[in-house]
Image (cartoon, rainbow, N blue to C red):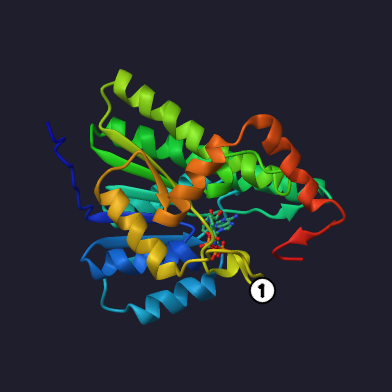
Amino acid sequence: MKRKRVTTFPQRVLIVGGTSGIGRQLAISYLKRGCRVAVTGRRQTLLDALQQEYAGYPLLTRAFDVTDQRVTEELACVVQQLGGVDLCIYAAGYGFGNLPLEEELEVHAVQVNVQAFVKVAVWMYHSWNQQQQAGHFAVISSIAGLRALGVAPGYSATKHFQAFYLKALRQLAVARRSKVHFTSIHPGFVDTDFIKGHQYPMTMSVDRAVACIIKGLDRRKNTLVVDRRWQMIAALMHLIPNGIWTRIGVFFRGSDQVFPHD
Ligand SMILES: NC(=O)c1ccc[n+]([C@@H]2O[C@H](COP(=O)([O-])OP(=O)(O)OC[C@H]3O[C@@H](n4cnc5c(N)ncnc54)[C@H](OP(=O)(O)O)[C@@H]3O)[C@@H](O)[C@H]2O)c1
């Protein structure tokens, strides 16, 4: 028997980390769909520019750093202003190819991609549950989170954590009869500032990535690899035995780069 496809359309969307790139384009796409949208990020000038460009749309913005102690207070303000949230997407992210293994870069990836992410996810989960509301929480993880990468240890490990954490929350939500749903999104290379100045294979446009993400979110997928070509790469990555995967690191011998922002 064919399984019934569940499709949902959120009315109120919160994008944490939407001043540029994937988060910004997601915000624009949801605005054009008629949703009320809130966008956060640190760069006030970019938030102002977005607000100006989409004047007349139900858009609100708030500048804050997700690693700030006050992150949950900031969230509470933005959610109250929005009048509640149906879908929250954590798009804020930090990470580098870090062959020299610089400690500061590794630790900062943990702060943004793990500590702040957990604070936002937990706060949203409780907020929805306290009001006995349905909610959808998604994170932009990465293809890099599917297997450990020696070229970017902090980045790949923290992106893996995000998906693993949402899997755990999904199980918890079922146990608690919570109406919160979780999606981890794993894009391949997307043409944003994140990879600026570097040529990577199979880089997709932000528009393409976002169209694919929104389709997957509408269908309430648990895990979403963006796009089809990267789904095949992801399947291949999983097939490679651990011993061989570990030796793949020899390709990076002789390089001591921090990238893409070196
Ligand atoms: N581009 C790719 O190839 C690719 C591939 C796989 C996954 N991803 C993931 O996609 C997500 C979005 O990245 P992107 O490609 O769209 O790059 P981007 O344009 O650099 O966007 C990153 C966003 O994160 C926000 N952010 C970073 N640190 C923050 C902090 N401490 N507090 C608040 N906001 C913060 C930035 O806003 P402010 O700087 O204004 O704070 C910006 O809006 C990231 O999680 C990244 O890991 C990207």
| Residue drawn at the location 22% of the way across and 55% of the way down | 11
Kindly identify the amino acid type of the residue bearing the numbered disc 1.
Answer: Gly
* Image-based side of 47 in relation to 242, left or right: left
| Residue drawn at the location 17% of the way across and 42% of the way down | 5
- Can you say whether 54 is above or below 83 in the image? below
28, 213: nearer the viewer? 213
Please rate how many residues cluster around mark 1, counting C-alpha atoms within 10 Å: few if below 14, some from 14 to 19, many from 20.
few
Rendered location of residue 51, percent (x, y): 39, 75
Which quadrant would residue 2 be assigned to in this image? top left
Report the residue marked by disc 1: 197
Which quadrant would residue 172 be assigned to in this image? top left
State which image quarter holds ligand 1.
bottom right
Q: Residue 146: tell me if it is visible.
A: no
Rendered location of residue 53, percent (x, y): 37, 81
Q: Residue 230: tell me if it is visible.
A: yes
| Residue drawn at the location 38% of the way across and 81% of the way down | 52
| Residue drawn at the location 37% of the way across and 29% of the way down | 170
